[in-house]
Image (tube, rainbow, N blue to C red):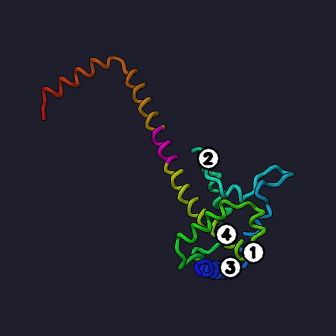
Amino acid sequence: MLGEAESLFGKSFTACTQSRLPDGSAGKLEELLLEGEDGDPAGGRRGFLQELKEDPGSFQLDTLLAEIAKLGRVNAIGLPADLFEGVSEKVVAAWRARAMKMYSSDFTAAAPPVRLTLLAALCHVRRTELIDGLVELLIQLVHKISVRAERKVEGEINAEFRRVHGKNGILVKLATAALALPR
């Protein structure tokens, strides 16, 4: 009985998801499979589906730019923000996890409603993860810039302090004046 209920829920969920997809989105999701999991053999490129499944690399400006481009491609699919409205996040996460483990051939073998739901769940959740990752990368980049700027300013101040001639005499006069007029 539980298996049958789970099967009915899956059919209902995939049909509902497919019906909520805008006209062009289904075709764009299917295009993810055309690029291939291992990329175009002639060009030697990885497919976008494989790139979408990967986490960002080491923290660099190139990583930030690549993640922005990846987010742009996911947004271009045109999935509505309320695609999974009324569905538990755990259910969507389970479908995303299932899609993460699949190869292009596995998607192709699946029935269209299941295939579209898997791809939509993957893109929907990855879009959120990409945004979160970009925020984290941006925070790290700003921190790195701040640390470098601080070190540079400190170095310049130290260099200027070393260049002042007679600085010990000036410091003694300054200290004497401060002691003479305490306030």
Tag 1 secondary structure: loop
The residue wearing badge 2 is 57
Quadrant position of the C terminus in the picture? top left
Tag shown at residue 18: 3
How many angstroms separate mark 4 from mark 2 (CA)? 25 Å
- Give the image location of residue 76, x and y in percent: 68, 67
Q: Is residue 82 magenta?
A: no
Residue of label 4: 118
Circle nearer the N terminus (1, 3): 3
* Badge 4: residue crowd in 10 Å (few <14, some 14–19, many ≥20): many
Mark 1 highlights which residue? 111
The crowding category of the residue bearing disc 1, from other C-alpha atoms within 10 Å (few below 14, some 14 to 19, many at least 20), is few
Residue type at the position of mark 2:
Gly
The residue range painted magenta reads: 140-147
- The residues tagged by marks 2 and 3 sit, at their Cα atoms, a distance apart of 33 Å
Q: Which mark is in front, 2 or 3?
A: 3
